[in-house]
Amino acid sequence: MKWGLFGGTFDPIHIGHLRCAEEILEIFDLNRIIFVPATKPPHKLDADITSFFHREQMIKLAIEENPSFSFSDVENQRKGVSYSVDTVDYFLQKYLDNLELYLILGQDAFHAIETWKDWQRLLTLCNIIVMTRPGYENKGLAGIVPDDFAARFKYDDKVRGLRGPTGHCIFFQGVTFLDISSSNIRQRAKEGKSIKYLIPGVVRHYISKNSLYKAS
């Protein structure tokens, strides 16, 4: 099995998330992409985040017509802050040798990887896919992680990725960049502006029905 883990706050999930996931699924020939919303994102502990229940419902609605997309509430089952390394550990331990795992990250998130819990172990636990924007100049790991750690990864022409000491790879993969952000969607909804075509119709109706993102 080749699975991709796509984590994030998803508040709300939007067309950009879905399009990137579809492209990664195709490019890397994955069997499944699992959307994993964070309960308590470590970089947003003070942020006002919509309840996990509503974010879960919106994701399920958004992906229900794609049999290659699925949802996991693993980070809601754990107490405390949501750490990607713990989520990767969970899937690897549960499926053992039957799973080839790919963690999907955005470019901005990866550039802040040193602020993540156990980041060095995370980058050697599984394959990493970094989704890059148009015009991104791929300089490998230079300037992102310390030189001594970067030196442990060597470019592999066969897979077009940086192969690490455990055999897993880091891939820098360009995807269609849709300049859509969840924060902008929330702001537009708060101001009563249209969010049509930024998110799936079923998600838009859910937001309206449950009066999410309304000004208090």
Image (tube, rainbow, N blue to C red):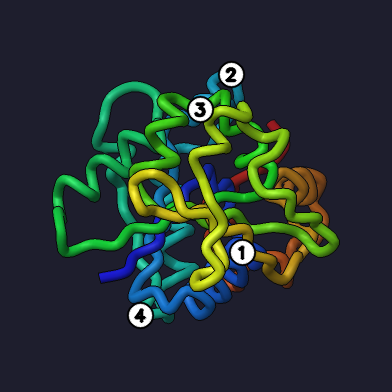
Q: Nearer the viewer, residue 135 or 79?
A: 135
Viewer-nearest residue: 6 or 96: 96
Q: State the CA–CA distance, disc 4 to disc 1.
A: 21 Å
Q: Is 107 above or below relative to 113?
A: below
**In this view, 25 is above or below 179:** below
**Left or right, 154 with reference to 60:** right
**Residue behind mark 1:** 204
User: Label 2 is placed on what type of residue?
Assistant: Asp
* Comparing labels 1 and 2, the label whose residue is closer to the camera: 2
Q: Amino acid at mark 1?
A: Arg
Q: Give x and y (percent) for residue 120.
A: 45, 31
Question: Compared to 73, does 58 lie above or below?
Answer: below
Whole-angstrom CA distance, mark 3 to mark 2, is 17 Å
Q: Position of residue 70 (x, y in %)?
A: 35, 66
Choose mark 4 or mark 2, whichever is in front. 4
Q: Residue at x 48, y 58 (%)?
A: 58
Q: Secondary structure at mark 4?
A: loop
Farthest residue to the top: give it: 46
Provide the secondary structure element on which disc 3 rests: loop
- Distance between mark 4 and mark 2 Cα atoms: 35 Å
| Residue at (31% x, 53% y) in the render | 72
Q: Which mark is residue 46?
A: 2
